[in-house]
Image (tube, helix red, strand yellow):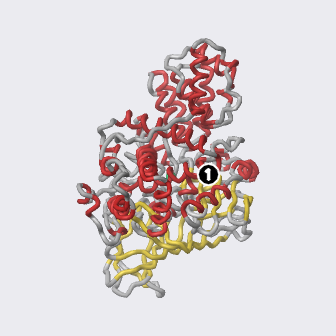
Amino acid sequence: MKIRLVTTTLIVCTLALAACRPSAEENPASDSSESPTMATHDVHSFAEPDQVRVEHLELDLTVDFESQTLHGMASLTLDHEGAEQLVLDTRDLDIQGVTLGDSEEATDFELGAEVAHLGQPLTIAIRPDTEVVHVRYATRSADAVQWLTPAQTAGGERPFLFTQSQAILARTWVPCQDTPAVRMTYSATIRVPMGLMALMSAENPTEVDPSGVYTFEMPQRIPSYLLALAVGDLEYRAFDERSGVYAEPSVVEAAAWEFADTPAMMTANEQLYGPYRWGKYDLLVLPPSFPFGGMENPRLTFATPTIIAGDRSLVALIAHELAHSWSGNLVTNATWNDFWLNEGFTVYLERRVMEEVYGEAYATLLAELGRQDLHATVDRIGADSADTHLYLDLDGRNPDDGMTDIAYEKGYFFLRSLEEAVGRERWDPFLREYFETHAFESTDTASFVQYLTENLLDTLPESVEVGDVEAWIYGSGLPENFPQIHSESLETVEAQLAAWQEGQAASELATDSWNSHEWLHFLRHLPPGLTSEQMADLDAAFGFTQSGNSEILAEWLTQAIGADYEPAYPAVEEFLTEIGRRKFLMPLYRALVETEEGKRRAEEIYAKARPGYHPVSSGSVDALLGWSAE
Ligand SMILES: [Zn+2]
C-alpha cells in the first residue's frame, strides 16, 4: 500500500507486524529454513498453519447497507494430516454456526478471549478426514469495512462500501487464517442492492448485473490481507484489453485520462521484472474517505481520488501499487516484521518504472523527496530507535504501530545501494530471478538475506564492495554507504525560494514549468516563522489555498497552520471534513495541536469529520487527540 507518510507517525500502508525474532537475527544468513513460508511464527495471528492450512475460501455474503453488516457463509477448504482442530482469526464477528463437509454436519466451536488488536481465536473441532469447514456469520462493527452514505460519495445518490484488510483487518469481515504466511485461492458470491456494482480482488465484471448477484473467482493464491470488496455506483473505462479504471460516473472520465499511462507502466514492469501474472490489472477510484493513497489489492488496485490532479503528476502512486503485483502480492512478507520486503522493494520498483516511463530526472526527483521523508522520519523517531531497523520487532503492538517511512524509503535506499554497488547488469537479472523463484510464496527477512548472499553477493568479484548488509537490515539509523542523490530540478526550485527570501516578489518567481513535486519541495522548504503578510504574498501569487491538487493543498495548509495564517482556516476545515487519507490528516492535525487555540480548533473539526473517516484514519487521529475509541 502506499501509505507513505511523510509526516505521519506511524503506520503504514498497511502494516503489521509480528514478532518473533528469529534466532537468525545475529546471523541471518545461517538460518535457513527449508520452507520460507513456515520460517517464522506470526505473532499477529492465532492460526496454526503448521497444523492445518486453508487452501481455498468460498464466500457467500449479502451486503446489507441498512444494518451495515455483511452476513452469510465462509467455506474453507483445508490441507492437513489428521488435525483435530482448526483455529481461525476473528474480530467482532457474530459466529452463528459451524458445520463440516458436504453434509454440513454441526461441530463444536469456541470463541476464545479477546486479545488487544488481534481479536478472538475461533477454535473449531474437525476430524482427521475433514476437507471443508463452513462458518455461518455476520459482521458487527468490522474495522475493515467502511459504509458510506450517499452524501459521502461523489455522486451523492447511492451508498458505497469498501474494505481495507491490510494489515490484520481481514478477520473483521472474514473468519480466516489472517497471516501473510498463508496463501489461498478464493471464490465468492456477493449479493448487493439493485443497480450497484460489486468488485473484488478477483476477476471482475465491467457492467452492472441487474440481478444484484455477482460471482467472483481468484485463481491465484493470495494472503488474507489482499481480500477486498467494494460496492457502489460504478462504471468502467478500459485503457486497453488488460487494464482499465472503475469509478463513480461523475469521476470516471477524469480518472481514465489521469491514469492513461497505466499500460506503459505495466510494459515497463514486465520488461524489468518478468510477466504480469494476475490476468487483468484495473484501478478502482474510491470516495475521498479512503484512508490510504492506494491499496494493492490484486487485479484491482484501490486508489484515493486525491491523486487525480488533472495533470497526471501524482501517478507515481499507480506505479507503486502496480509494482506490488511483483513485490508484496507475488512475493509476500511472511510476517509484518518483514514489511520492508513488501514496501522497500515496491518503492524500488516504482522508481525504476517511473524512470522508464518518465525519464531519469523525474525518478531522481522522486528519490530525493523520498530521502527527505526518510530523514524526517529518522529524526522524529530517533536514529537509535529499533523502529529504524528494516527488520522490525512489533510483538505485542498493533501492526500499524512502528510502520513508517523506514520500510518504504530505507528499504528503497538499501536496494539502491546494492544496485549501485553491483551495477544494473548484475542487479536487474538477480531481482527478476528473485521474483521468479519466489512467485506466489511468502518469505521472511532471513530467507531473503540468504538468497541474496548465495545468488548475488557470493558471486561478486572481490573488487565489488557492497557495504554492510546486516547494518542496513538489523541496525538503526542510516548506514554509511547511503546513496547520494542529486536532483537538478529541485536545486532550481531552491534557487527560486532563495530569491523570494531575498526579497523578490512571489509573482516574479520562475515557476511556470513546475510539477506537483517541485511545488511540494518549494512548500516544504519555506523557512520557519513566516508572517501572515509573507503567506499572503505567496497565496496571492500562486493561489495555494484554492489549489485543486490535494498534495499541494495539504502541504500548504500545514504550513499555514504553523504560520497561523487566518485566511486558510476555512480551507483547513473543509479539507479535513472531506478527505480521509491519513497521510494528509496526520500532519494537519499535528500542526493544529501545537497550540492551545489550534487544539481547540482540531477538536471542533474532528467532532464533525470523524464519522466520515475510515477506522484506520480515525484510530490514528483518536490517538493523537487523546480520544478513546469506543
Ligand atoms: Zn505499498
Depth order, front residue of 310/226:
310
Q: Is residue 42 visible?
A: no
Residue 291 horizontal side relative to residue 93, left or right = right
SS category of the residue bearing label 1: helix
Residue placed at 51% from the left, 23% from the top?
A: 562
Q: Which residue shows up at 70% across the image and 47% down it?
A: 154
Tell me the residue at 47%/87% (across/down): 103
Vertical placement of 496 versus 411: above or below? above
The x and y percentages for residue 565 are 58, 19
Answer few, some or many: residues within 10 Å of disc 1's Cα (few below 14, many 20 plus, some between 14 and 19).
Answer: some
Closest to the observer, 497 or 581: 497
Where residue 100 sits in the image (x, y, percent)? Answer: 42, 82
* Mark 1 vs ligand 1: CB below 8 Å: no
Q: Which residue is mark 1?
A: 356
- What percent of the width, then of the height, locates residue 35? 34, 71
Residue 70 in percent (x, y) is at: 54, 63
Query: Disc count in the image?
Result: 1
Q: Nearer the viewer, residue 158 or 185?
A: 185
Q: Nearer the viewer, residue 61 or 276?
A: 276
Is 385 left or right of 64, judged from the image as shown? Answer: left
Q: Residue at x 29, y 38 (%)?
A: 384
Answer whether residue 416 is visible to the viewer in this image.
Answer: yes
- Residue type marked 1: Glu
